[in-house]
Amino acid sequence: MSSLDPDLEKRLIEVQRRIASRVVLQDQFSEEAVAGVDQAFLGDLVISGAVVLSASFQKLDTAGHIMRAALPYVPGFLSFREGAPAIKAVRGLDPKPTLLFVDGCGINHPRMAGLACYVGVILGLPTIGISKYVLCGEFEVPEKLGEATPLIYGEKTTGYLLLSRKGCRPIVVAPGHRISVDSALEVTRRSLDGTKLPKPCQLAHEHANRIKILCFPVSEASPSGPGRR
C-alpha cells in the first residue's frame, strides 16, 4: 500500500469535497437501462469493463478501456486511480445507462466521495456503489440470507451491509449519485441473480477480465490489484 505526497493529498481531498457537494441523494433514476462497471489490473494498467442491460437484464452492449494508473493504490483515493478508465468505458455504452452500478464505495467514504460518487457526478448518471469491505463506519453483520443492516458513519446511514449469498461475506451497498440510500438497497436486491454481486456488477467483472485475457498473453498476466475499498 502506498502513500501520497502531502501536497497532492490536500489537492485530491479538495476535489473530493467538491464532488461530495454535488452529490444528490434523491431518486432521479429509472431501471430502463441498468449498467455496471468494474476494473481488472495488470501491473500498473487499469482495465475497465462496462455492460448495459435492459429492464429484463438482457445484455444490450459492452465497452472497455485500458489506461495506465495515474496513482498507486491508496485507500480512500480510488477515484483518482480507477475513475478515468471507468468513465471512458461507460461513455462507450449504447444506449446510455439510466442507472449504473460501480464496483467501489459511494457515500460510504470518509469524505462522502467514493468512486461511485465521482463517476456519477462526472457523468451526470445515477449510481450505486457496491463494495466488498467497509471503509468507514459502524455496523452489525447480517446473519440471514437477504438481511440488510445499516452502515452508520457520522450519525448518518451511508449504506447497508447485505448478505446477498449464503456462505459469502456481505456486500456493502451505498448510493453514489441521484439515488437515495434505501432505493439503492431495493434496486440492488432486485438485481441479484443467485450471485453475490448484482448482475450488472458480475457481468462487468467478467467483461473486464475478458478484455484482460484477450489483450494480453496469459504468460504476462498477474494477479488482480490489491484488496480494494
Image (cartoon, helix red, strand yellow):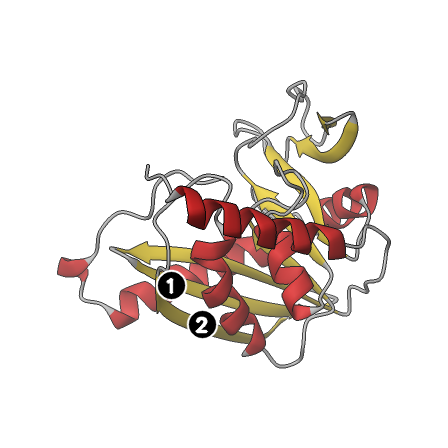
Comparing 132 with 25, the one in front is: 25
Q: Is residue 193 visible?
A: no
At label 1, the amino acid type is Ile
Are the residues flagged by discs 1 and 2 in contact, CB closer than 8 Å?
A: yes
If the image is split into quadrants, where does the N terminus sit?
top left
Locate residue 40 relative to residue 193 in the image: left or right: left
Comparing 112 with 171, the one in front is: 112
Rendered image quadrant of residue 218: bottom left
Please identify the residue farthest to the front as the structure is shown. 7
Locate residue 11 relative to residue 209 in the image: left or right: right
Residue at (58% x, 29% y) in the render: 166
Could you say which disc has been placed on residue 64 in the image?
A: 2
Could you say which disc has been placed on residue 47 in the image?
A: 1
Few, some or many residues within 10 Å of mark 2 (<14, 14–19, 20+): many
Q: Is residue 48 visible?
A: yes
Few, some or many residues within 10 Å of mark 1 (<14, 14–19, 20+): many
Q: Is residue 54 above or below residue 100?
A: below
Residue at (28% x, 64% y) in the render: 213
Residue at (21% x, 56% y) in the render: 221
* Image coordinates for residue 211, horizontal then vertical, percent: 36, 68
* Image coordinates for residue 19, horizontal then vertical, percent: 66, 55
* Image coordinates for residue 103, horizontal then vertical, percent: 54, 50
* Image coordinates for residue 59, horizontal then vertical, percent: 60, 71
At label 2, the amino acid type is Gly
Whichever of labels 1 and 2 marks the residue nearer the N terminus, that label is 1
Q: Is residue 225 above or below residue 137?
A: below
Locate residue 82 relative to residue 41 in the image: left or right: right
Residue at (71% x, 32% y) in the render: 146
Q: Is residue 214 above or below residue 193?
A: below
Q: Secondary structure at mark 2?
A: strand
Q: What separation in Å lies between label 1 and label 2 (alpha carbons)?
A: 7 Å
Q: Secondary structure at mark 1?
A: strand
